[in-house]
Amino acid sequence: MTTSISIRLCVDLYGVTNIVSGVIIQGAPNTDEWVESFKVRTGIQECNLNYIVGADIYNPVIFTGNYDSNTEVTNYFPQPVTARFVRIEPTAWKVKTSLRFEVTGCFTNYQPPVCETGWKGFGSYCYYFDDIARVPYAEAETACQNLGAKLVSIHSQDENDFVGYFAKHDGVGNSWFGWWIGLDDRTVTYSYQWVDGTSVDFLNWIAGEPNRSNENCAKIAPKKGEQWYDVSCTLLYPYICKKAG
Ligand SMILES: [Ca+2]
Ligand SMILES: [Ca+2]
């Protein structure tokens, strides 16, 4: 990918979500113009990109850029991300923010999931957002099973962003206040488990939650930064299902 002068360069990775592990940049060909340092944002929705961060999750990584026109400088991210959009935000440059830019990652062997009509793909899974239903948790669980799926499990900030984005934009009425996700402590209080049996390797409770031993089911609340609450399993919410693509 080669591009012209741009303060913020954003690329759409062929219109599909990819695993991106880093970026490679060069200065302008045979001209003393290059980007000396930069930040990177990535994401699956163009208007909702997150900065690449490292151990300090609150501050974007400042990547070291070029020192001449033609040497390719490769920067790997602290860990690969799932992204369709990659945006370079120069923080220092020589004369102009000229750069040539490529991304590294798994493009040749990544196959976007094939999802039925009405389902949305992310990673290797398909997701269904039933924003019409208003049902208790157990009914939502059954409804997903009837679709050959399970109530959604969430395993990364990227997956949470994806789920949260569609929870927000597909939602009508009180879906804005929450959707069932497949996380509960119905068996052992405060021992939360995913109903699809996957490991609990990511949690996104809002501050102060989970807060009640008699609230055993989790919802994601798009209105509250896509964070999670424990609530009574008898409350009525729409729900999100997930199955392999
Ligand atoms: Ca509980
Ligand atoms: Ca609660």
Image (cartoon, rainbow, N blue to C red):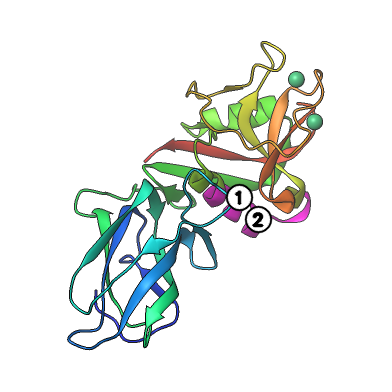
Q: Nearer the viewer, residue 97 or 1?
A: 97
Q: Compared to 92, does 157 lie above or below? A: above
In the rendered view, tell whether residue 245 sits above or below residue 222.
above
Residue annotated with mark 2: 168
Can you give x and y, in whole percent of width and height, for residue 237 in the image?
73, 39
- Residue for badge 1: 164
> Residue, x 79% and y 33% (percent of image)?
208
Q: Could you say whether the residue bearing mark 2 is in a helix, strand or loop?
A: helix
Q: Quadrant of residue 97?
A: bottom left
Q: Classify residue 39 as left or right of residue 144.
A: left
- Residue 213 shown left or right of residue 151 in the figure: right
Quadrant of the picture in which ligand 1 is shown: top right
Asked if residue 166 lies in the magenta stretch, the reply is yes
Residue 87 in view:
no
State the extent of the magenta-drawn residues as a range: 161-174
Secondary-structure class at tag 1: helix
User: What residue is rendered at 66% in x and 11% in y?
Assistant: 187
> If the image is split into quadrants, where does the N terminus sit?
bottom left
Residue situated in front as seen by the camera: 199 or 163 = 199
Report the amino acid beneath label 2.
Lys
**1 and 2 marks in contact (CB < 8 Å):** yes
Side of 108 relative to 162 (left or right): left
Q: Amino acid at mark 1?
A: Gly
